[in-house]
Image (cartoon, rainbow, N blue to C red):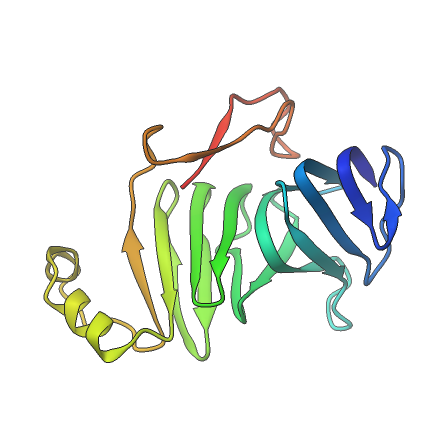
Amino acid sequence: MVAHAERAHVGEAAASAGSTIFDGDQLSTEAGGALRITGPSLRLQLDAQSILTLRRPADAEDGMEADLASGTLVFSAARNGSITVVANDALIQPAANAATVAHIRVVNPKELRIYAQRGALEFSYHGESELIPEGAAYRVLLDPSDKELTAFSDSEEARQKARKPHTKFLLLAIATAAGVAIPVLMPHFESPDSPGPTSVSKMP
């Protein structure tokens, strides 16, 4: 159900608080818009200029698949909330049966920004996967060039990890300080199993 809508759409129609979201619906926001939807164990927010399609996989009774075509999605899942975000053919989902809050932004067809605000995330892309720990923020390069792979292998970050980098993607750690973060205003947005409003969240 739509909890808040501002310059937002469900399909071709303008979204409004109380509107019901159905399997396969495309949600979108205009410049300066925002859309929040709530369910029993999941809450989602779309930032401005975002496009998202929600689907319920046939093999998952309680699961939700969110296909983020553009823009920024923030999801909050309770311990029993099951969600898989698809972005640029990559999959992002809670790494464990635990309350999770995550920010995912599509920068371009080859780059994502992911911030595991609460709980760890499992990231996978074309057969390779990596755990994103709670509190970590990454710039994700998909299908990196040989030059990018070599540069990463020679970096201090790679030496600290002391392991061979993935060939299908690179996770480049980024700071989450206010000076480099993009704010996502989420009034009264919270984890479904942790009542009470949160402060302004940050999307790296």
Q: Is residue 43 visible?
A: no
Which residue is rendered at x = 68% and y = 54% of the image? 51
Above or below 198: residue 118: below
Q: Is residue 108 visible?
A: yes
Q: Quadrant of residue 168?
A: bottom left
In the image, residue 125 lies at what x, y percent?
45, 72
Left or right of residue 141, residue 76 in this image? right
Residue situated in front as seen by the camera: 156 or 148: 148
Which residue is rendered at x = 51% and y = 51% of the image? 105
Left or right of residue 169, residue 94 in this image? right
In the image, residue 30 lies at what x, y percent?
70, 43
Q: What quarter of the picture does the C terminus occupy?
A: top left
Above or below 69: residue 127: below
Left or right of residue 42, residue 79 in this image? left
Residue situated in front as seen by the camera: 117 or 89: 89
Q: What quarter of the picture does the N terminus occupy?
A: top right
Which residue is rendered at x = 62% and y = 20% of the image? 196
In the image, residue 61 lies at what x, y percent?
78, 63
Above or below 11: residue 186: above
In the image, residue 133 lies at what x, y percent?
36, 49
Residue situated in front as seen by the camera: 90 or 52: 52
Which residue is rendered at x = 51% and y = 50% of the image? 104
Residue situated in front as seen by the camera: 151 or 20: 151
Q: Quadrant of residue 17?
A: top right
